[in-house]
Amino acid sequence: MITVSDKAARHVQRSLAKRGGGMGLRLAVKTSGCSGLAYALEFVDKPESEDQIYESNGVTIVIDPKSHVFLDGTELDFVREGLNEGFKFNNPNAKAACGCGESFAV
């Protein structure tokens, strides 16, 4: 299960409206960063046949099967820290994260 916080849902919905539409957001994992894995986000217009689809707070989240193993149980949040803002991944599968928060290890 993947969940989206209220703040993240509002941000995604505003972004989709500015974009002019879309089905939702793709959440994936790629090999990268100093800890081994990094999160990837992109808008989705149409899912692939093998994708898993979740609905949370009015937002559709699409995940490919390979990424699902690393992301199951994750909450997608949107935070503001000082002058910076962005998505925060509350992932119960992450055992370690790099100092910059861009990558994680399981």
Image (cartoon, rainbow, N blue to C red):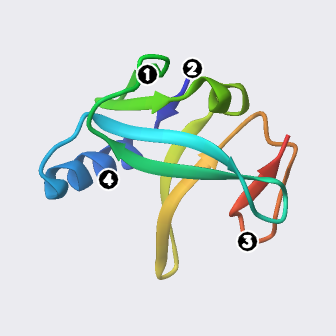
Amino acid type assigned to the residue bearing label 1 in the image: Tyr
Q: Where is residue 93 in the image (x, y as percent from the top left)?
A: 78, 34
Q: Earlier in the sequence, mark 3 or mark 2?
A: 2
Image mark for residue 54: 1
Nearer-the-camera pick, 27 or 66: 66
Mark 3 residue crowding within 10 angstroms, few (<14) / some (14–19) / many (20+): few
Mark 4 residue crowding within 10 angstroms, few (<14) / some (14–19) / many (20+): some
Q: Position of residue 49 (x, y in %)?
A: 42, 17
Identify the residue under disc 4.
11
Whether pointer 4 and pointer 2 mark residues with C-beta atoms closer than 8 Å, the reply is no
Q: What element carries label 3?
A: loop
Tag count:
4
Q: Distance between the residues labelled 2 and 1?
A: 7 Å
Q: Which of marks 1 and 4 is nearer the N terminus?
A: 4
Q: Residue at x 66, y 28 (%)?
A: 66
Amino acid type assigned to the residue bearing label 2 in the image: Met
Q: What element carries label 2?
A: loop
Identify the residue under disc 3.
100
Q: How far apart are marks 3 and 2 (CA)?
A: 26 Å
